[in-house]
Each structure stands twice: as C-alpha cells, then as structure tokens.
C-alpha cells in the first residue's frame, strides 16, 4: 500500500471514532483500526455524567468539566440520548449529607446557565430552572396517592411511579430527581460506524489488529510512522493511540514509561416483570468498595434493566484495579479477569453476579426480587492516567513527537480529546493546510434514525445482548 495518511488512529472505541469523525470535518484523512467486528466495544456507559451526579466524592471542577463535555457529546450524537431523568437518593445507613448533593446541584445549575448563555444550543438537558427538583418525605407520601402514568411527562409523574416501588423509609430525605439523561452505547456505535463508512476521509478497518508501530522520522522517508497489521504496512504522518486500557502496549514499544491505573468493571442485564409506568434511573448512593457501595438501576425497553453495584461481588472485582509498575507502561490483569476480558464469562459467574446485583436492588426496591438474569454482562476495562483512582476526567497527552495518547476515563471526554489532538497537529505543522471546519454535526446528521435503529439492533444482537438494549425508552 503506497498511500500516506495524514493520521493513523489505533483503537475504534468512543475516543477513536470521535477523533476520526472530527478529523474528517477538517478535511484531514485518516485510517482507523479496530480489532473487533464493529466500533465502540469498550467499557459500558449508560448515562451522560452531565455534572458528576453519580460521584459524590469528586471535585466541583470535575463536575463542571463532565457537564460541559457531556453536553458537547449529546449534541454530537442526539439519537443516542435517552431523555429520562435520574432519581438520586442516599440511604440512611450512609455518611453522605443530602445538603451536599443539593449544594452541588445549585452550582451545576448556575454553570449550566453560563453554558447556555455562551451558546443557546447547549440547552439539551432541559431548562436550567427545571434541572433538578427535590422531594421531602411529605411530598413522597402525597405522590403515593397519585395514579401511575405509563409515559410520565413531569417530575412529579416520574416520582409518583418511582415511589410506589421504592422503600423510601430507608432513604434520607429529601430525595432528588435530576435531568441526568441516559446514553445508549449501541446507538452511538451504530451512528458512528455509519458515518465513518460514508465519509471518504476515513478508511475504517474493523477486525484488524495492529501488531506493531515503527517511528521512521529519521529514515529519510516522507512520512513519520509505519503501522503494521498482519497483512499490511500503513504509512501515516501522525499517530493517535486510542487503545483504551491497552494504551500502554504501544508506549512500551516506544520505551515510554508512564504511570497509569486500569480497572475492570461490569454491569449486569436483568429482566423484570412489566410495571405500570416508566421509572427513571435509580441511584442509591453508598461508599464505593464497601458492602454498601452505590446501587444503580438503569431502565431499558421491554422490561430490561442494567445494574451496577459498586461492591466487589457485583461491579468491582478483587484485583480489578491495578497499577503500572516501574519500567512497565502496560499493567497486567490476573488470570480470572483476563478470562472474562478475552475468552468469555463462565455461566456460573454470570448467574452469581447478576443474582448478587438483583439482590442489591431488592434492598431498596423490594418487588425487584422477581427479576431474573436477562443476558450476559456488559463489561470492559478503562484506563485512569496517573495514580488517582477517583479521577473521572482524563483527556490526552503528547509524550512523543507526532504522537497523541488518548487517556479518557469517561466517554464524555472524547470530543474534547479529538479537538486537543487537532490543535496539536496544527501546532506541529504536520499537515500544511487544514480546511475550514464544516458544520458541527454534518457527517453524523446525514445518518437517518431508521439507519441507526437498524444497525444498533444488529450490533446489539451480534454482541449477544437482548435487542431491547438498542432502543430508547423515551424517543427524541
């Protein structure tokens, strides 16, 4: 192959695909490599994290960054956003104070207003005045008397449906309903793959593993890198390492030592009985890693629910958080986690952990005891740059000439990273002329909802999950 690409992107996760799409908007050609059959196969995500509402321990600054980045990504992939709210509560057994959560929400409302002032199109989380609503115990008692609403339209209707199921006597009051929307991984994957296939500015290579990279800047050739696969050598001027938790593999080949954590986590798919009316995502805060770690119930279509439980017998794992060692850029998991990551889960593990997850929900939603295993877990490993496991905002670093390393922790950071990489490419004068950027959503806008519906359904089933997980419960 004689073609020289401006940019080579290794890894077709959410960061890799957004980088390739942004490059295309600037008229920059790229080649993208993904070892799986389709793009965006990494750690599962199911909500925007628009403000860090799920993390009571992180800083206000991280919350503001997450809100800004989430809004940017929701504008980029609107057909993947499930516009249902989130119920946030603190069990009476836990240390967190209700007023701390409310103070943070007031800060986020003020920040959200500034984002809307900067650009009215940022108002994608509803009106800032309606961003959240709090409910006292008396409010909950009164809403118990209201009839169920099959498709709720107001905060009170969402809470009325919810409080008939939740044992609110176990919760501190007030509780909160927040416009923290859902985010559908399968729909984002479908829209991104369709757009990449349509643009002439990106050659998408799925089912393709990169075996090696080679720096050739000193070899008197008119390109900087060679990317080696089993069958081809690709020539590129700028290299983007977007390999997620395997980012260190290529750092090691360049003799770059860097400090990083990687963490393996899983969420569980359950099937429940039909209930009379939609409910929001349910959050019951608790201290991560303890037996009382946060419980999270995410609704999908057709009575499917995804569960996170931040304990070692549900979402977290013994030896699931590991750190790079001296002179080692790529940490290595043990045998048990590698089995799950690369060779598949054993049926007993799926059943045991999903049943543990169901039991954790039942503490707060007693009737959820009738739920059953609904499919295989959603799982993956994420990188965390540095040595702080509580970090939720990671971006990009440039440790080598004409080389960028994406270090996102949450999917919402992907657009920020793409734009930082394009800025660096301009600074390094890798590409002499960069075209004027086209309309923000032009490539993605040309993909129809029907196309997304069809491919999202196909990807979900191909990956072994119920088709219902590809659908939104609230259509846009």
Image (cartoon, helix red, strand yellow):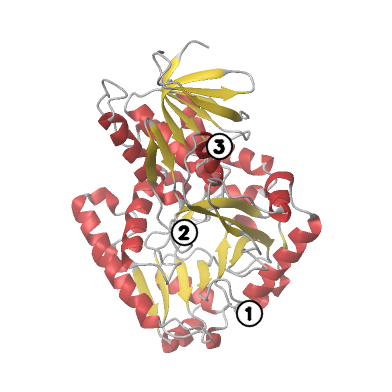
Residue beneath the point at 21% across and 59% down: 114
Closer to the camera in the image, 238 or 220: 220
- Front one among 288 and 450: 288
| C-alpha distance separating marks 2 and 3 | 29 Å
Question: Mark 1 highlights which residue?
Answer: 363
Mark 2 or 3: the one toward you: 2
Q: Is residue 287 left or right of residue 437?
A: right
Circle 3 — which element?
loop
Q: Which residue is mark 2?
A: 387
Q: Give the side of residue 264 with respect to residue 254, left or right.
A: right
Q: Residues within 10 Å of mark 2 (few under 14, many from 20)?
A: some
Q: Is residue 198 above or below residue 55?
A: above
Residue closest to the eye, 381 or 379: 381
Marks 1 and 3, how far apart in space?
37 Å
Q: Is residue 188 visible?
A: yes
Are dots 1 and 3 in contact, CB under 8 Å? no
Q: CA distance from mark 1 to mark 2?
A: 34 Å
Earlier residue among tags 2 and 3:
3
Image quadrant in which you'd find residue 296 = bottom right
Residue at image mark 3: 39
Q: Secondary structure at mark 2?
A: loop
């Amino acid at each position: 192959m004689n073609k020289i690409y401006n940019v080579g992107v290794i890894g077709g996760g959410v960061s890799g695909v957004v980088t390739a799409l942004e490059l295309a908007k600037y008229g920059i050609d790229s080649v993208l490599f993904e070892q799986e059959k389709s793009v965006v196969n990494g750690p599962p995500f199911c909500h925007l994290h628009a403000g860090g509402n799920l993390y009571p321990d992180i800083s206000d600054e991280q919350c503001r960054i997450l809100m800004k980045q989430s809004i940017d990504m929701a504008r980029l992939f609107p057909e993947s956003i499930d516009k249902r709210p989130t119920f946030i509560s603190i069990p009476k057994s836990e240390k967190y104070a209700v007023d701390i959560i409310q103070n943070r929400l007031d800060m986020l409302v003020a920040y959200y207003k500034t984002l809307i002032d900067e650009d009215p199109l940022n108002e994608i989380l509803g009106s800032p005045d309606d961003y959240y609503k709090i409910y006292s115990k008396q409010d909950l008692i009164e809403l118990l008397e209201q009839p169920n609403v099959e498709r709720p339209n107001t905060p009170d209707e969402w809470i009325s449906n919810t409080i008939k199921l939740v044992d609110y006597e176990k919760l501190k009051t007030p509780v909160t309903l927040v416009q923290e929307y859902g985010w559908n991984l399968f729909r984002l994957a479908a829209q991104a793959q369709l757009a990449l296939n349509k643009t002439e500015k990106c050659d998408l290579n799925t089912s393709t593993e990169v075996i090696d990279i080679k720096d050739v800047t000193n070899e008197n050739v008119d390109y900087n890198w060679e990317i080696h696969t089993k069958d081809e050598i690709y020539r590129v001027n700028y290299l983007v390492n977007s390999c997620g938790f395997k980012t260190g593999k290529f750092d090691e080949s360049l003799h770059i030592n860097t400090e990083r954590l990687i963490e393996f986590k899983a969420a569980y798919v359950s099937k429940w009985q039909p209930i009379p009316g939609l409910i929001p995502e349910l959050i019951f805060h608790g201290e991560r890693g303890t037996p009382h770690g946060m419980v999270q119930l995410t609704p999908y279509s057709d009575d499917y629910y995804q569960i996170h439980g931040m304990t070692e017998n549900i979402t977290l794992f013994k030896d699931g958080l590991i750190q790079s060692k001296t002179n080692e850029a790529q940490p290595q998991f043990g045998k048990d986690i590698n089995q799950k990551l690369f060779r598949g889960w054993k049926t007993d593990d799926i059943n045991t952990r999903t049943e543990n997850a169901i039991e954790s929900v039942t503490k707060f939603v007693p009737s959820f005891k009738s739920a059953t295993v609904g499919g295989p877990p959603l799982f993956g490993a994420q990188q965390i740059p540095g040595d702080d496991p509580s970090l939720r905002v990671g971006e990009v670093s440039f440790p080598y000439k004409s080389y960028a390393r994406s270090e996102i922790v949450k999917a919402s950071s992907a657009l920020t990273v793409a734009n930082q990489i394009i800025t660096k490419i301009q600074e390094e004068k890798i590409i002499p002329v960069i075209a004027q950027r086209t309309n923000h959503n032009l490539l993605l806008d040309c993909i129809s909802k029907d196309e997304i519906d069809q491919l999202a359904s196909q990807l979900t089933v191909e990956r072994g999950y119920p088709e219902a997980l590809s659908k939104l419960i609230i259509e846009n």
